[in-house]
Image (spheres, grey):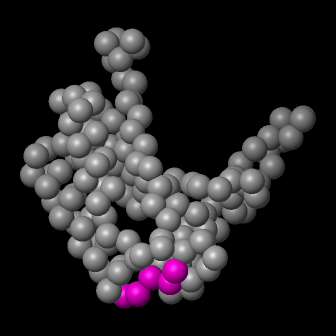
Amino acid sequence: MKYLVMVQGTQADYEAQSGKGNATSPAWSEKDLQAMFAFMGALNDDLAESGEIVDGQGLAEPAQTRLVDVDKDGRPVITDGPYGETKEVLAGYWVLDCASLDRVTEIANRIQQCPIPEGAPNYPVVIRPIMGGPDDAS
């Protein structure tokens, strides 16, 4: 079964990773970033070796988001940046093909072990089954 495994973040988190600490997250050092990248690289290597990874990507900061909506007449309304009331946004994801929900939960638990600076927010890892076949509609 395929699963979408998602990690969340905020614009403030991206700024902190760029060295600009704020009220919700301390500034990340180069050493902090390298530890995160090394951890994620090793995780992705292990998932590739096991044949479980289909895709995985980190996403650009929310400030680079473009929203496309429609007005009451069906005309496109295009705005830059995330919704003002949005707190967390999708920061990165993996599409995994795992034998069971238990297995993908083990992987999500490993993702939670990613090193972050003390005081930085730690968000839950979200697992969503990907619907794709007749047996998936349960």
From this viewpoint, which residue is outermost toward the left? 49
The image position of residue 11, as x and y in percent, is 60, 68
Q: Is residue 41 left or right of residue 119?
A: left
Residue at left 44%, top 50%? 124
Q: Quadrant of residue 37?
A: bottom left
Indicate left or right for 59 with 68 as reference: left
81 lies above or below 107: below
Q: Position of residue 51 (x, y in %)?
A: 13, 44
Residue 56 lies, with reference to residue 99, above or below; the image says: below
> Farthest front residue?
119
* Residue bounds of the magenta highlight: 26-30
User: Who is closer to the viewer here, 120 or 82?
Assistant: 120
Asked if residue 14 shows in the view, the reply is no
Residue 125 drawn above or below residue 113: above
* Residue at the right extreme of this rendering: 73
* Residue at horizontal 40 percent and vertical 48 percent from the top: 125
Question: In the rendered image, which quarter contains the N terminus?
Answer: top left
Q: Residue at x 48, y 73 (%)?
A: 119
Query: Residue 27: within the magenta?
Result: yes
Percent across and percent down for residue 32 are 35, 81
Relative image position of residue 138 (x, y in whole percent): 39, 12
Along the line of sight, the residue nearer the viewer: 60 or 19: 19
**31, 61: nearer the viewer:** 31
